[in-house]
Amino acid sequence: MESTREQLVGGCLCGALRYECSSRPKTVSYCHCPDCRKTTGSAFCVGVCVCMDSLKILGASIKGYTKTADSGNRITREFCPECGSPLFTKVDAFPHLVWIKAGSLDEPGHLESTHQIWTRFSVPWAHINDDLPSFPWEGPVQDNE
Ligand SMILES: [Zn+2]
Ligand SMILES: [Zn+2]
């Protein structure tokens, strides 16, 4: 498949799993729910919603963990069995859709976010304060001995 800026191509950190998606995103949403916080290890998850049948997964066999959410939906979060990178979210109630973890894209810079959900669970540090000391490259390591 030829790579263009429009195409969604990505993979995990170690490279064992790669994917290509031939359709454009339906939505690009932030999820602030506690389960997404846990599974990403970050303040929120950014999910790129696409049609399941447009997603081609290449490489190693993927692993998934299924949990029933507070909403009652059974949600499966899939990840690389080698490096643990979170890649996809699937919701039983929407079997024709899949949410790609935006950070796993090779070129995530051109995405346009559409909305955010479960904002009642948003942590204060989900918003990055513009006044924080900021470094274009590697910042100082502080060990306060
Ligand atoms: Zn991997
Ligand atoms: Zn969530």
Image: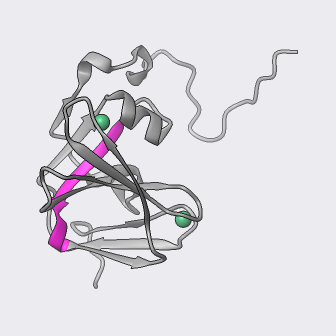
In the image, 74: left or right of 126? Answer: left
Part of the protein shown in magenta: 45-54
Q: Any magenta on residue 139?
A: no
Residue drawn at the location 42% of the way across and 72% of the way down: 18
Q: Quadrant of ligand 1?
A: bottom right
Quadrant of res 100: bottom left
Against 7, residue 38 (above or below) is above
Residue 56 vs residue 107, the one in the foreground: 56
Q: How many marks?
A: 0
The image position of residue 77, as x and y in percent, is 36, 51
Task: Looking at the picture, tell me which residue is in the foreground, 95 or 6.
Answer: 95
Task: Determine the residue positioned at 50% across, 37% down.
Answer: 41
Residue situated in front as seen by the camera: 91 or 11: 91
Question: Is 50 contained in the magenta span?
Answer: yes
* Residue 138 in the figure: left or right of residue 95: right
Residue 30 x %, y %? 27, 36
Quarter of the image with the N terminus is: bottom left
* Residue 11 rendering spot, x and y as whole percentages: 43, 66
Which image quadrant: the C terminus?
top right
- Who's the residue at 24% across and 45% down the image? 74
Above or below, 72 relative to 17? above
- Predominant secondary structure, magenta span: strand
Residue 111, relative to residue 118: is it above or below?
below
